[in-house]
Structure formats: structure tokens, C-alpha cells
Image: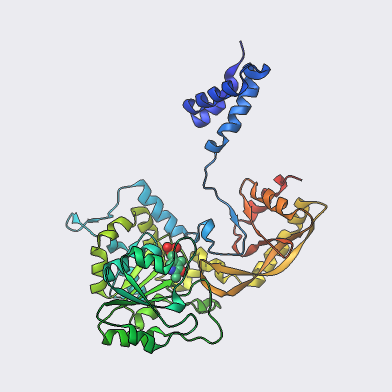
Amino acid sequence: MANWSALAPLIQQVGRSMVVEALRAWADARRGQDDVGDPAACAHWCAQRLAAFTQPSQRRVFNLTGTVLHTNLGRALLAEEAIEAAVMAMRSPTTLEYDLEDGSRGERDDHIAPWLCRLTGAEAATAVNNNAGAVLLALNALAAGREVIVSRGELIEIGGAFRIPDIMARAGCRLVEVGTTNRTHLKDYAEAIGPETAAVMKVHPSNYAVQGFTKSVSAAELVPLAHEKGVPVIEDLGSGTLVDLDSWGLPHEPTAREAIAAGIDVVTFSGDKLLGGPQAGLLVGKRAYIERIARNPMKRALRLDKVRLAALEATLRLYGDPERLVQRLPTIRALARPAAEIHLQAERLLPAFAQALGQGWQVGLKPVRGQIGSGALPVDLLPSFALMVRGKGLHKLAAAFRQLPIPVIGRIEDDALLFDLRTLDDEAGFIAQLDRLAP
Ligand SMILES: *Cc1c(COP(=O)(O)O)cnc(C)c1O
């Protein structure tokens, strides 16, 4: 009688029913073969088949692409304070919609709205699933069945299916385009505003820049015109930040506070881009409009859960102390890292990196330019340093890095495989697994 204890560890790992399923598949696949009764061969085959179930599908990786807020790699990393708050909310019942004072029902927005108002100067605030949702909701709540005016220079596609004209249609609004791709004047808006106009919308051109013979109308010019005609102005800031990135030597990115100060009625922006929090779409602005938005049934469909609300609240709280933001918020920390510090790190890692790769590769350091990502500041690149490999078979080598226990994602540029170190925090973890690179 064969010894089937070889299957015990697998049963321990994935449970009996999945192992039974794999055994049936083995029996079908190997029927009539010599090894069908061989426990070791069978256990090995079943383990391989079940590998997909023993390993999570969404895995931790090293993002060394040079793009700090990489949409495909999950954008912002949360601050420890936000992680703790999220874990608490996952483990326990919370005051999500509960008022402890009088034991009555509370509002979920009350956890974040005071912070958003304080940090942007807005009268009121609310939050939904993401910025695409925020734009959809704002348009539907304020302009369904009516016209919304947008400059042709701002009819953007953010990637995936987020195109302003499509969102506009889904929100039930009629898009009225004004101006041309490169130039839109105040009089273009003035001529388009009519009795059917429900709103004027500005969109931050996140992932491209129109350069040369250009003209766009600033919020400061547009708001008085729209308000004179009794029409609100909505602005999709995209990344939208709560602090002046200039403080860390970064180029200026419009802040939500500036948009509010310019008189914009409803400003929308993302939670997981420059803000450095969980995925969310934030809406700040005039009380009457935010209340209409919050009452819209779509708000219920797009609302945030307690876990993300907890993480968002904790992230916003950090902005109350901007001096320590760079130490506490990973996004700002990564963006603010001086190139000289990254250079030192690269020099420190190079010997171990070169040794792990062995003969046959040219290994060195390279000054590179990374990007913020997620559409923020598209034309401004972050000076950084990368570990660089040249040689034959770079795509295979890049694949080997992706097969490591913690996959390492770099980029190939000008016949070199580059690992930009701006976003490498866990140096020891990175180096420790390099000896697993298959030769
Ligand atoms: C990124 C972006 C969006 C979409 O935001 P999500 O939070 O990813 O839904 C919308 N508009 C602009 C201008 C953006 O940059």
C-alpha cells in the first residue's frame, strides 16, 4: 500500500476539498500511466496545480519603475497612521454612522468633511469611491438633462475608459465644447452660456501639456463670468494636492485651496494620487452644491466603506502638521527625496547587485528621470539614480526579476534595464532575494 502522507502538507495548506479536486484531475490526466499510483509524483503534480491557490493573486512588488504613483501598481502607499486606522476599522465595529453623544445616527462624511474644509478653505465636503466617480456624481447632481460647457483644450482621456465626453454622457449631461484644442478665450465661454447651461467645467490636463501658441482661461477669469450668469463652475483637479509641493523643491501643482479661493463652486480630486491616501474621490465646495451632491442617489452607490474612510481620515489628519508630512507620508517622502541621497543609495547597493548578476552583464549606475505618475505634472521629471544592466537578453532578465519572491519591476529604456531607486525603502529585502535570480 502506497504512503499517501506526502499529500498531508498540501491538505494542511489549501484544505481537503481542493486536494481531492486535484487528485481527480491527476487520476484523469495519468490514467493508465505507470506513475498514477506514485504518491510523491502525485503530490508534486497536485502542488503545482494548486500553486495558484496557495499564493495570493495580488502580491507585494518592488516598484522601481521610476513612476512614484504608478496606477497599475496601486498608486499611493499609505502612512503608518492610515494603516493602523484601517486595521482598527477592519477588526472592530466603529462609529461609522453613529453619534456617541446622544446615541443616534451619524453621518459617514462627518469623519472627513471637517478636515477637508479646514485644509482647502471650502464650506462643505464629501467623498466617494474615486475621482472618476466624483466627477460623474457632481455632473449628474448639478447638471443632468442640461448643458455643461468645457473647453476643447480640456476634453481629456485619463486612460482606461475615463474620457470627459463619455462621463458627461453617462451623467446625463449635454456637452457643449468651446474654443479650439490650443486656444480658448473668455468670450468663447461667454457666447456659449445660455438658458440651458447648468454648469461650466474646468478639467486639469493631467497627462499632457499643450505648449506653444496656447490660451486657456483661468478660474479667476472664468468664475466671475459664470457667476454673473448664475452658473456654477466645477473643476476636476485630477491629482489635486492639499499642500504646496514647492516646499519640497517640486514644481507647482494646483492645490484644492487655490481652486476654492478662485471661487470654484465644486472641486474634485483623487485620494490616492498626490494626496497619498487610499483610493477616493473628494468633493469640496459651496455648501448648497455639496448638499445636492450628497443627496443624489448615485452618492449611495459610490460611497466609501469604513476601512477607506478610516485611512482617509488618518491621512488628512497628517496634513494638520505639514512640517512632519515629509517624514510621515510615503508619497511626499518619495517625491521629496534628494537625488544626492538616491545616488548614495545606488552606490551602496551596486556591489551586491553586480555580484548577484554575475558575469555576462554590464552593470552600473545611471542618472535618470522619473515621474510623479497618475497624471500629476506630466512634463516635470524627477532627477534620480538607477541601477542599470546592459547586455543580451534584457527582456528575459527583466522577467527573471519579476519571478523573484517579491517581484521587482523596473523599466527598459535605450537598451538598458533600469531600476530607479527613488522608491526603494526596503533595501535589505531587495538585496536579500537577489541570489535567487536564476543564472
Ligand atoms: C486621475 C484623474 C481622474 C480619475 O481619478 P481616479 O481617482 O483615478 O478615478 C479624473 N480626472 C483627472 C484630471 C485625473 O487626473
Apparent side of residue 171 relative to residue 395 in the rendered image (left or right): left
Q: Quadrant of ligand 1?
A: bottom left
Apparent side of residue 97 relative to residue 10 in the rendered image (left or right): left
Apparent side of residue 208 relative to residue 386 in the rendered image (left or right): left
Any part of residue 254 in sight: no
Q: Position of residue 363 (x, y in %)?
A: 77, 59
In the image, 348 versus 298, the foreground residue is 298
In the image, 323 versus 436, the foreground residue is 436
Residue drawn 56% across the image and 78% down it: 249
- Rendered position, 176 above or below 80: below
Q: Quadrant of residue 311?
A: bottom left
Any part of residue 414 in sight: yes
Residue drawn 62% across the image and 28% down it: 45
Apparent side of residue 152 relative to residue 136 in the rendered image (left or right): right
Q: Position of residue 389 (x, y in %)?
A: 75, 59
Q: How is the image coloured?
A: rainbow
Q: Position of residue 56 (x, y in %)?
A: 52, 42
In the image, 14 versus 329, the foreground residue is 14
Q: How many marks?
A: 0
Q: Quadrant of the N terminus?
A: top right
Report the residue that reaches farthest toward the top: 1
- Rendered position, 33 above or below 345: above
- Rendered position, 133 above or below 407: below
Q: Position of residue 431 (x, y in %)?
A: 68, 52
